[in-house]
Amino acid sequence: MEEEKNNQEQNNNSINNITSTAFGLLKKFGSSKFKIILIIVGAGIILLALILLLLFGTVFMILDSEKSSTNGNLAFSQIGDNSGFWWPVGSNETTTENGVTFASGQPAITSISSYFQANRCLGGTCRPHYGFDVGSNGKIGVYNLIAIKSGTVIKAFNGCADNGSLNNNCGGQLGNYVTIDHGNGYYSRYQHMAQNSITVKVGDTVQQGQVIGKIGKSGRCTGAHLHFQIHVGGTSNSFAVDPLTYVDPNDPRPTASGNIIVGNNVMQTVCLTLKQEGYPDTGVAAALGNLKRESEFNLDAVNERDCRGIVQWCDTRKNELLSRYGANWTKLENQLEMMIDELNSAYYSSTKKSMLSNDSLDSKTYVFCMKFEIPGASECNSGIRQQNARQLLSYVQNGCK
Ligand SMILES: [Zn+2]
């Protein structure tokens, strides 16, 4: 015991002799009193560091979330209320929620290189061009393609190489492609997709903004691009309509607050918008038959009773129209917005219910008339509205064209 202590003292003395002041201080801290102080101070420093880390972490998280909501891109899946059709090309940045990847920000590219047309000639062969093309500056497997609206995948072909040419018949010339059934007779088709980029399979349900694959150069094509089609009423090319009737590169992510689909004229815009709102063809035709009788779709129409617009708003509803929009009451989007708001209100719930139901066209036309105009049964039964509605039904069934 004594010997051990002596040895230790000798060691300590020799260390003292050869080490600096710093080591000497360390040796002092080596005593039990200083050890306790050291532990307390150390723990304090660690605790302080943890608090600072937590604080800065939170600040960075806030900064980060602010960045993503103010960098010009819309939030991802959150804005997808499925009320309108979105531009088919997604943002470059993606986000994954519950295992589903979205590219719902502003689209990376919107330029159309070739439009929907009755006759397009390529390599000496002329035939209809059933959709529009979006060029990708030669890039293959870069740009995300997204579901323009929620739906179910009914075709997904994934077997073609990105070596498209005018003689390439892979995928029935479509290359790798996806077809989505959006319900109510609407279909979208994405062609010439990049090899192995397709992330969905037949039977999958997809959400608006969900990534389904990437632009490629497969099948019959001369360069990398998206060929995009929308069909109304069936899946074959004969049902293809001009996709620009539904998607708009200038308003690529329409939501419920601005869900009016603008057509070539007032009647087409009303027709497309009501269809998009989910009304069946007979419901849309019933409304159109009434509006035609009311105003001939003249937005400026003012009758002898001072009723105004396409619906011929009268009395308190006219005042509502004027107070809401002021001098802009003659604008189509405003009148259509008010009409849809009315249809969605509790007062018109029975009208909406009838328009959405399997009731006959005549019956729907009558109900719409009685509630929107309330002129009395004789006027609503006079037959002119019903006649209009019957005449316009095929127009509605044909995708409002
Ligand atoms: Zn094309």
Image (tube, rainbow, N blue to C red):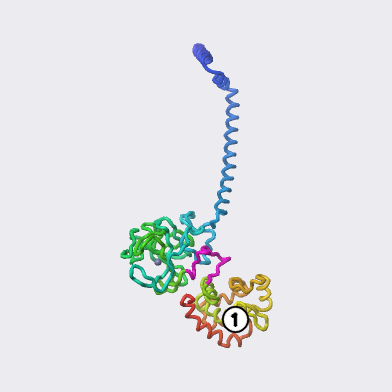
Q: Note whether ligand 1 is within 8 Å of mark 1.
A: no
| Residue 143 placement (x, y as % from top left) | 44, 57
The reply to whether the magenta stretch includes residue 314 is no
Q: Is residue 82 left or right of residue 347?
A: left
| Residue 371 placement (x, y as % from top left) | 61, 79
Residue 231 visible, this angle: yes
Indicate whether 96 appears above or below 359.
above
Determine the image quadrant of residue 228: bottom left
The foreground one among 228 and 205 is: 228
Indicate whether 257 appears above or below 92.
below
Residue at image x 53%, y 75%?
265
The foreground one among 133 and 296 is: 133
Residue 1 visible, this angle: no
Residue under label 1, please give it: 295
- Main secondary-structure element of the magenta-colored stretch: loop
The foreground one among 21 and 350 is: 21
The foreground one among 324 and 346 is: 324
Label 1 amino acid? Ser
Q: Which residues are magenta?
A: 244-262
Q: Quadrant of ligand 1?
A: bottom left
